[in-house]
Amino acid sequence: MSQEHFAQSDIEEGLLAGLWRRPVDGFVWSRDYKSLSDPRDSGPWLIPIEKSGWERYPVLQHRALLDDFISLGKNPTARRVRARAKRYGPLGVWVQIEPHGGGDVVLGESLHEWQWHSRAVATWSQLFEWLERGDATSLSPFVRWQQRPVGVGIRIASLNGRPDGNLATRVHVSSDYTSFGAMPQGAFWDGGMLASEEYDPERILTELRYRDSIEPIRLYLHMRVNQALRERITRTILYPSREIRYFPVSLLGAIYVRLQDHLTPDSRLAERRCHYSGCRNLFIPRRRDQIYCSRPCRQAASYHKEARK
Ligand SMILES: [Zn+2]
């Protein structure tokens, strides 16, 4: 990692903080370890190949990142996870693991973690696709309205990354949504109460139409992606420009940033590059049609255009 070289312009453009690391030689799977934090997780564990060098790359510039993760979620086998990890690096959800016979503690990533997140992202993006099409029929099995007291909950089940209404209705959910009963291999499930008359501090129910199954799903997706980004975003001051930027701190953070962009109609918060040739900094636009980062840049650009005439 010591022989990395970045131009000052790379750093100013925020590439440095948006860079993620991957081992050049990739990873191996191993079952020879146990987790120090969760004894129930028996692995296997994804471990960087020993003595592999690491390289950095600008993760947010990979346009296919979200699609790649969605397609992984439809069939997250160990072999396919390893291939994705070689391309994009670790998720950034390391746990300390120790050899069964004792020995040095190393860092590894659990297959379960890769499977859970990739299935979640595949499931949520399919729900969003139905939502965008206004397909209430496909969404209704996952939305639970209750009458007395009025309330709305979500119950999601998916198989191979595809939400499955039959599976969702078959699943037994305890009243506090902590137990979901037995699920088949490759299933993902999730759920919870969005709001009820008895507990609705955000006044969500006033925004929803009774028995609607579109907007509750939208609300659920927003809650989940916001929750996933908690502690996966950092706020950084760049040197020497002193600009403030938000960056994902891990591959998983970058994936959820992309999913959040995907859920946002005009991706207002996606960074773009200032059109003024003397600036070219990334900025977060306040309007959809904004092409300059600031008033001075807009003025400078129009001045130079006039000067050329
Ligand atoms: Zn500018």
Image (cartoon, grey):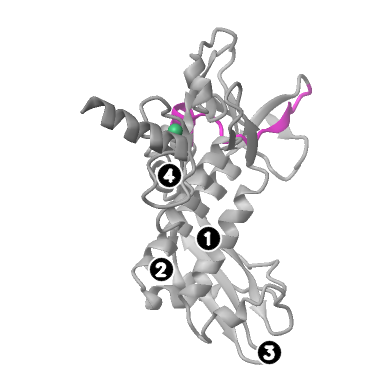
Residue under the image location 77 percent in, 39 percent down: 37
From the top left corner, tell me how far across and down residue 292 is, in percent. 41, 39
Residue under the image location 60 percent in, 76 percent down: 153
Label number found at residue 66: 4
Instruction: Please tell me in which quadrant of the rendered image residue 35 appears.
Output: top right
Front residue of 266 and 248: 266
Real-space Cα distance between discs 4 and 1? 26 Å
Judge depth for marks 4 and 1 and give the one in front.
Answer: 4
Which residue in the structure is indicated by mark 1?
A: 184
Q: Is residue 86 shown in magenta?
A: yes
Label number found at residue 123: none
Q: Residue furthest top?
A: 3
Front residue of 119 and 2: 2
Q: Which of marks 2 and 1 is nearer the N terminus?
A: 2
Which residue in the structure is indicated by mark 2?
A: 131
Real-space Cα distance between discs 4 and 2? 18 Å
